[in-house]
Amino acid sequence: MKKIEYSSYTRPQRLCKQCGLCCTVAVFQYSKEDLDKFSERNDEEIDDFMRVFEPYKTLDEPRKLAPEYVDIVVNEMKSQGIYDESRPVFMKCKYALEGGKCAIYQNRFGWCKRTPRHAWTLMPVGCGFKGWQFGLQEQIKH
């Protein structure tokens, strides 16, 4: 039996259901203020992210798109003691189109191609990468 190697670079893109939630209800581990500081260091990937993603002002907007996912993320952040209601957590990509499509898919950024980034990324309910993620988690555990 062939052993499957799991990594963020071997993720089979065919698993993506193209729902667009990773683009319209994106969560980044840093605050907008943190990203601004990183941007001062001329980090090209952060600069691109800052040009493309904009934070939602309230939880109501992303909650309309993915209520279960918003609750999962908020509850996880609260359990870690890192949730701050005054800080925007969810962001949206300006290239996200209706129906989960991307306006620049053929020329999308590298970090778009590598989403989800790691085994413990919190993903929307029903994401096609859940099985891949579980395999990666098990590989890391062993």
Image: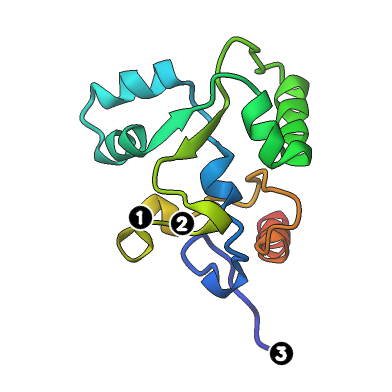
Residue located beneath label 3 in the image: 1
Q: Find residue 37 and report its image quarter.
A: top left
Residue located beneath label 2 in the image: 114
Spot occupied by residue 116 in the image (x, y as percentages of width and height): 55, 53
Residue located beneath label 1 in the image: 110
Identified by mark 1, the residue type is Gly
**Mark 1 / mark 3, whichever is N-terminal:** 3
Q: Are marks 1 and 3 in contact (CB under 8 Å)?
A: no
**Mark 3 / mark 2, whichever is N-terminal:** 3
Q: Are marks 2 and 1 in contact (CB under 8 Å)?
A: yes
Position of 49 compared to 17: left or right? Answer: left
Spot occupied by residue 139 in the image (x, y as percentages of width and height): 68, 62
Please give the name of the residue rendered at 65% of the width and 12% of the height, measured from the top-left corner.
85
Q: Nearer the viewer, mark 1 or mark 3?
A: 1
In the figure, 86 relative to 48: above or below?
above
Name the image quarter holding the N terminus.
Answer: bottom right
Identified by mark 2, the residue type is Arg
Give the spatial CA distance, label 1 vs label 3: 32 Å
Please give the name of the residue rendered at 71% of the width and 60% of the height, measured from the top-left corner.
130
Q: Would residue 30 be seen by someone viewing this image from the given angle?
A: yes
Element type where label 3 sits in the image: loop
Q: Would residue 142 be seen by someone viewing this image from the given angle?
A: no
Please give the name of the residue rendered at 32% of the width and 24% of the height, measured from the top-left corner.
38
Identified by mark 3, the residue type is Met
Q: Find residue 127 and report its image quarter.
A: bottom right
Please give the name of the residue rendered at 61% of the width and 19% of the height, measured from the top-left corner.
58
